[in-house]
Image (cartoon, rainbow, N blue to C red):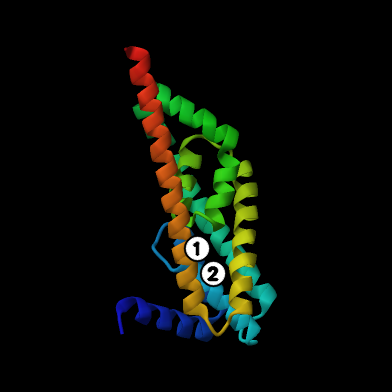
Amino acid sequence: MNSVAQLTDLLLIYTVTYGSPLIFILLLIGAAGVPMPCTFLVLAAGAFVHQGLLDIYTAIGVALVGSVLGDSLSYWMGRLSQRFVVQRFGESDIWQKAQLNFNLRGGIAIYLTRWLFTLFALPTNLVAGSAGYTYARFLVFDIAGEITWLLLFGGLGYSFSSSLEEIDQLISNVGGGLLGVILFTIGLVIIRHKKRQSQQLE
């Protein structure tokens, strides 16, 4: 049995044994940046609710609070680094444009990285804090995204409680495919932008 499978088995055993308090702790530290199979944990929680091992309202409540607290922690880590970032990059046109764009459109980035592009959740939190995005606005989109994540994947775990690992693998494959498409698109945009710049210089 490989280490990933062992971790998965231990996670299932500990979740059944310790219940909602463990879900709270693991989602908090996972959202704060410690590598954790958080989506699988939500799937497992949904399955355990279906089996009557967890109370649905308690599980959703502690999972939401833990996730939001972890996201808030990484947001404030970014806020604490704001002074350094401004001193280092504040005069840069690129940083000023990035900051403006995030303040205008950061909400959708925060929302989508809670449940769809979760790989970018931590960097988004740090950027939100360091770019001066207000905590109140961050919290609104963060809570909305985390609720979407919990209901979507918890619901999947509830509906397919006998196939957790297969569902988790499918989610990983779909997420990886979406990420690949996004990166490819960004690459094309950058290439086209550089090509236009070179043509203007000629």
Q: Label 1: few (<14), some or many (≥20) within 10 Å?
A: many
Q: Mark 2 points at which residue?
A: 24
Inspect the image, locate mark 2, and give the three-letter code of the amino acid beneath it: Phe
Taking 162 as reference, is 199 left or right? Answer: left
Inspect the image, locate mark 1, and give the three-letter code of the amino acid beneath it: Leu
Residue 161 image offset from top left, x and y in percent: 58, 82
Residue displayed at 30% across by 80% down: 2
In the depicted view, which residue is nearer to us: 132 or 100?
100
**Quadrant position of residue 200:** top left
Q: Residue 86 carries which label?
A: none
Residue 33 image offset from top left, x and y in percent: 42, 57
Residue 116 image offset from top left, x and y in percent: 54, 56
Residue 159 image offset from top left, x and y in percent: 63, 78
Q: Name the residue under label 1.
A: 28
Residue displayed at 48% across by 56% down: 118
Residue displayed at 55% across by 37% down: 133
Say which quadrant the C terminus sits in: top left
Whether residue 67 is visible, yes or no, is: yes
In the depicted view, which residue is nearer to us: 168 or 190?
190
> How many numbered discs sit on the rendered protein?
2
